[in-house]
Image (tube, grey):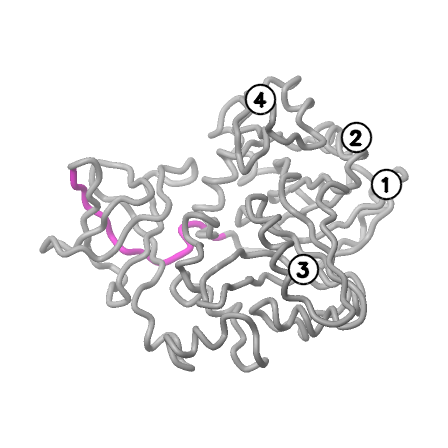
Amino acid sequence: MNDILKKTPLTELHKLAGAKMVSFAGFEMPIRYDSQIKEHLAVRSTAGIFDVSHMGEIEISGKGAFENLQYLTTNDVARLSPGDAQYTAVLNIDGGFMDDLILYRLDSDRFLACVNAANTQKIFSWFKNNIAGEAKVKDRSAEFGLIALQGPSSVDCLKRLDADLFCDLPGKFRHKQVLFEGASLLLARTGYTGEDGFEIFVPAEATPSIWNALLERGATACGLAARDTLRLEAALPLYGNELGEEITPFEAGLSWIVKLKKGDFIGRKALIDRFGVSPSKFVGRQLVGLKITGDGIARPQAKVCSTDDKEVGFVTSGTKTPSLDYPIALALLKKETKLGELLMVEQRGEKFSAEVVQLPFYKRIFL
């Protein structure tokens, strides 16, 4: 393992537990502990925990923080009250993704943006270079550990930590501060698996004790491999696969996080110039789901063709996942592609059949 890789507050615990470690976004991270399949199914049936401390945390605060974020992000920050969270994006001037992120409103003039690990420095610099007025931008990533507790037993797991403290939990896309054993936690009802669950921002030095406490209450330690198959089943996009600087939110199926009517924001003019004010009518390509019906597993960048051998796009993510008995894929295809249409995936000189299906592949009904 390369010595220059960054470590999270939990790296040594992962190694002691026998996790297989890999390089990911400049960090030394666990890909799995024992069985990727067991870890995946634990999240679907009970509860799993993931070390996502590699994610970046950027605070935007002070006078004008709100106005700046309205200009820097695509969603409508005015919809956020303190305690709310919002999925949103930062675009370049051409309307392509610089990153997708979750924005937490901590107070009226104080926000925390949780960004993808590989994009932390890029987004921090972008914010610094584009911020106006008296608002301040601070990279707080080194201050936090971040644990994702995901699965239908997540609530029970927290209550086993402290039934009284965790009796009043935040609702979906809400967050609250909790003081647990002397550590101030930001407990957010968000996640990246398609399950109910929480993302817990923890002071870096307290992260190992919280991780161990959750393991002792029945959570299963999970690695990046299970996280990827879980998010793929839920059709949640991954930056670098479904999202990138050449892909717009309208193409990625994320038009709902773009509020053209809220006023100006970076990338807005490019989107309108390219797609008009009714993007669904003009988009040239779209993100779709594929059920692989032939003998093969689609991999990123595999070419997708019509049955008469005309190229219609490419695969962005694909594998066979533990919850389904067939391989699946996400693909960026021509807008004319229809549900139920039969296509061919071409990979390494071989072709196999696929059907366009409704997304997500897996969806839990939240009670």
Is residue 49 visible to the viewer in this orientation of the structure? Answer: no
Name which residue type carries label 4.
Ala
**Which residue bears the numbered disc 4?**
19
| Cβ atoms under marks 4 and 1 closer than 8 Å | no
**Which residue bears the numbered disc 2?**
209
The magenta span reads 350-363
Q: What residue appears at the point 67 percent right and 61 percent down from the top-left corner? A: 85
Q: What residue appears at the point 60 percent right and 37 percent down from the top-left corner? A: 46
Locate residue 212: give its quadrant. top right
Name which residue type carries label 1.
Ala
The mark that comes first in sequence, 3 or 2, is 3
The mark that comes first in sequence, 4 or 1, is 4
Cα gap from disc 3 to disc 4, whole angstroms: 37 Å
Is residue 257 visible to the viewer in this orientation of the structure? Answer: yes
**Was residue 143 drawn as part of the magenta stretch in this picture?**
no
Label 4 crowd bin: few (<14), some (14–19), many (20+), radius 10 Å = many
The mark that comes first in sequence, 3 or 4, is 4
The mark closer to the camera, 3 or 4, is: 3
**Which residue bears the numbered disc 1?**
183
Cα gap from disc 2 to disc 1, whole angstroms: 10 Å
**Rendered location of residue 61, percent (x, y):** 78, 63
Whether 251 is drawn above or below 71: the answer is above
